[in-house]
Amino acid sequence: MTAGQPADRGPWSRDTIRFCSTADGTRIAWAATGAGPPLVKTANWMSQLDLERATPIFAHWFEGLTRGRRLIRYDERGSGLSDQKSRFTLDEWIEDLDAVVDAASLDRFPLLGVGQGGPLAVAYAALRPDRISRLVLSAGYARGRLARARDAVEQAEAILDLNLTVAGWQAQEGSYLRFLGAQFFGGSPPGKWDEFIRYQQQTVSPANGIRFLEAQSRLDVSDLAAQVTCPTLIVHSRDDPRVPVSQAKELAGLIPDSRLVVLGGRNHLLTAGEPAWPRFLDEMYAFLAEEEPPAFGE
C-alpha cells in the first residue's frame, strides 16, 4: 500500500462497475461487490452505483450484504449511470434484470428486493422460476399505493402523497421533498431525510423521478405473487410509514412458501444504528444458508 492510500477493508470495499445491453438495446450499468455465492439485488427507487457507495445512509448495506457473498446490483433504466430513456414499465424492468444476470453469467441465484424493488423481485421470481432459488423481500409490497386504495378516502390520500412529492421534484423544493425523506426514514432525525433528498437529486432527473413515482404507485403484482414457487422470506418494520406492515402480511398470504418476520422500528430503509438492521441480516443469512450453496470456487 502506498503512502496516503486508504487501507483495504476487505472484498466488500471494492466495486467493479460494468455495462450490459438489454434485448431492446438499452445500456444498463451494473456492479459486483465482494466474493462468494451470488446475491442479486433488484434496483429500488432510484440509484447511482458510484454515488451509492459513498453515501453514509447506504454504506452499511454493502458491508452487510457481502458477508461471504458476491453482491450484484444495478441502476435501472431512467436513473443513475444507465440509459435515461424509459417507458417505466414492469416489462422493461424485467428486461433490465435479465440483462444484468446474463452479463454476470448467473443461472440460478437468490434474489433480494428492497422497498420499491420488491414488486419487481416478486414478478421476476414468478416469471423466471427456473432462475430464482430463494427470494428475500424487505419493506416490499404487491400493490402500489394507488393500486391498493380501497375507497375514496384512501385514493385521495394516495393522490395527495403523489402530488406533494411530484411538486417537490418539479420545483426541486426541499420542504416538499422532505416529506418523502420522512417516509423513508421515519425513525431517524431530519438530517437523515435531507441526506436522502440530496442523494435522490443526484441520481435522477426531475422528469424521470416523477414518472417513476407515478408508475410505482400503480404497480400490482398480486396475481404474480400467488405464482411464486421458491422459498420466500418477508421482512418488514412494524411501523414503516412508507409501506405499512399490512402489505407484508398481504405478501405472506399470497406467496405460498413464505415466512414473515416483523421487526421493530419506523424506518422504511433500515439504518445501521437500529436494532432491526442486525436482526434483518441474521434472518436473511439463516434463510439463505438453508439453500446450502456449494463452497465458493467449487
Image: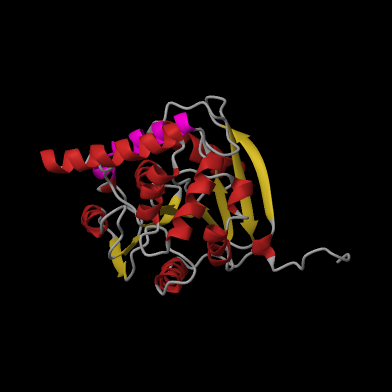
Give the residue at x 68% y 50%.
Answer: 16
Colouring used for the render: secondary structure
The furthest residue to the left: 151
Total count of labels: 0
| Image quadrant containing the C terminus | bottom right
- Residue at 32 percent across and 39 percent down: it is 164
Percent of width and height locating residue 295: 60, 68
In the rendered image, residue 22, in percent from the top left (x then y), is placed at: 55, 31
Check residue 208 for magenta coloring: yes
Extent of the magenta region: 206-224
Q: Is residue 249 left or right of residue 153?
A: right
> Can see residue 110?
yes
Residue 161 figure quarter: top left
Magenta run includes residue 184: no
Left or right of 72 on screen, residue 269 = left
Horizontal placement of 261 versus 112: left or right?
A: left
- Residue 104 visible (yes or no): no
Q: Residue furthest right?
A: 2
Task: Residue at 64%, 47% (x, y): give it.
Answer: 50
Q: x, y percentage for residue 129?
A: 39, 47
Asked if residue 37 is positioned above or below residue 275 in the image, the reply reads above
Residue 260 x %, y %: 29, 65
Quadrant occupied by the N terminus: bottom right
Q: Is residue 231 above or below residue 19?
A: below
User: Observer-nearest residue: 238 or 226?
Assistant: 238
Looking at the image, which is closer to me, 225 or 86? Answer: 86
Q: Against 280, is 248 above or below?
A: above
* Horizontal side of residue 58 vs 263, given as left or right: right
Q: Magenta residues: mostly which secondary structure?
A: helix
